[in-house]
Amino acid sequence: MWFVAGLVLISQGEVVLAVDTIVQIVPDKAFYHPGEAVTLTISGANGKSGAQVKATVRYLGETLTTLSASLQDGAASLSWTPPPTTPRGYGVDVEVVDADGKVVASGSTAFDVLDDWLQAPRYGFLTNFSPGRSDIEATMDWVSSYHVNGLQFYDWQYRHETLLPPASAITDPTTKAYVDVLDRVHSLDTVNRLIDAAHAHNIAAMPYTAIYGASYEFYEQHPDWALFVKPGQPYDFADFLKIMDPTPGSPWANHLLNEFADVLDKTAFDGIHIDQYGAPTHGLNAAGQQVNLETAFPAFIDAAAAIVHEKRGAKGATIFNLVRNWPVRTVAPSDENVVYIEVWDPYVHFMDLPRIVAQAHTLGGGKPVVIAAYILPEHFVNARLSNALIFGSGAYHLEIGEPNAMLSDPYFPNLAYMNDEDKEIERKYYDFLVRYENVLALGTSDGEDRATALTIDGVPTVSFRSEDRVAVIARQAKDSSFETYSLVNLMGIGDGQWNGGITQAPTPLSALATTIHVNKPVKRVWLASPDGTDASAQAADFTTGSDAEGDLIRLNVPTLAYWTMLVVEYQS
């Protein structure tokens, strides 16, 4: 991650020295398989002769090892092989020390060890498949610095019904260039180079497809494959696609499933990403029979997953887009690997985000959840609060991919770009997500029934409101050894809509007198936050007591800017 450090030395109230140093700490992969060495590259340090970099590796609050190396021209490389235990996230705290032993810069990053990316799918996106793309390695470095370990190749295909370009559509045999249905020029050579580069960084590559979209030309060749509003009137989408009938066993479904198999045979993609458009929800087939997409979708997903597993084995991935969270009740239990939800109305408020995540975890039987919620970078307060709520709920947010960009539109090529300050904050949040994934997501379950156990003196917490409160999101260890409480500050924001335009940061809070009702003896309590300069775990003093509701502990939460995480460990 990038970290801008400013060290100011003060003597008798006067500034006598100031050093500003930009340190870049980049892990070489998005995640690590058991037994793989982790290599961290530190560069940009403004070190003098004899300066060293020291990195402390921690698992939660436990220090595992300290690594060091001398800086050469302001750069160093550190390597360490973590224990093979999976899944597990680690934090790395780095200091640059000069020859006199003084710290001149500091920063942190994170990494994790997983069996495969689907244990913690930090999903991202790519949209540029142009011939001769020259920044592929830099793009993978960018993505890896945010620990994004899966990439959706959005609108890479030749046609929605013909995913790979036929030989007749290739306009340049050297780059294998072709023109898609919206007249964008792509290159199969670029697609393949992106896949290979992603794999070199332990990043999965997922091809975008649509479950029922077909070009007008294809529809005209197969008019009886469509889905109809009424007899003779097919559904239309965005004036360039027709909606086809995806019922398994239908001609369109068979055709598209064969396309999936062809893509997996001829490329190194890791599975299939399947889109829908949120409407229609039903229709008629060519015979005039009712088609209920709420049941057709999961049946098609199961058929697609069977092909993915045949071609890629158990680690092949099938992901389906639940637009407006529909139809989550039938799709979440299907054979998809991730419950992927594109959030629209009626889910417009901040507190809708943890609610739909909790529902998806339940309906999906504990499958990981990815949220696609599009927010403009200029509304970065919204993005920051949304990430706190999503990550605190044990889920992931599709937003990072193409360099410097934030996904802010459902048509992914309509990119918007972050400024340097927001890129740094965003990276801190992703570091925090990985560093504490073992108490935020992995090995935990929703603790909605425990959220009301935590209260703060003088601050609203128990409320359905999405503003002027501190949201409390609880996660519980599946072995009951701990509880995690994410405190998300929604005080003073003036607008409770996650995709609105909040113009001011939440009102900073401090010295929060916090009470938690507990069911068994507490061993320790610790806190951490991505909002300051130190994301490491900090022990919290607490006292025990009881009231009419039962046993409790009391403690002080020193600060709450946007997101502070509190972990209560119980005695065994």
Image (cartoon, rainbow, N blue to C red):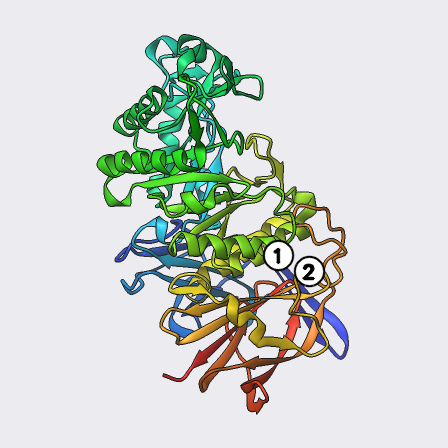
* Position above or below: 353 against 319: below
Q: Identify the element where label 1 is drawn.
A: loop
Residue at the (41%, 16%) spot, across then down: 286
Query: Which amino acid, mark 2?
Result: Arg
Q: Amino acid at mark 1?
A: Met
| Image position, residue 465 (x, y; %) | 69, 60
**What residue is rendered at 65% in x and 72% in y?**
559
Q: Position of residue 473 (x, y in %)?
A: 55, 65
Q: x, y (%) of residue 207?
A: 39, 32
Residue found farthest to the bottom: 545
Tags 2 and 1 touching, CB below 8 Å: yes
- Measure the C-alpha gap from mark 2 to mark 1: 7 Å
Position of residue 4 in the picture relative to residue 71 (left or right): right
Which element type, helix, strand or loop, lies under badge 2?
loop
Residue under pointer 1: 351
Asked which quadrant contains residue 530, the reply is bottom right
Q: Which residue is mark 2?
A: 465
Nearer to us in this view, 88 or 375: 375
Nearest the viewer among 195 and 70 is 195
Badge 1 local density, few (<14 within 10 Å), some, or many (20+)? many
Q: Is residue 174 above or below residue 405?
A: above
Picture residue at 25% right of the left edge, 27% below the top: 265
| Closer to us: 117 or 37 | 117
Determine if residue 176 is in view. yes
From this view, report whether residue 532 is shown above or below residue 500. Answer: below
Q: Position of residue 391 (x, y in %)?
A: 52, 57
Answer with mark 2 or mark 1, whichever residue precedes in sequence: 1
Q: Which mark is residue 196?
A: none
The vertical placement of 338 against 303, above or below, is below
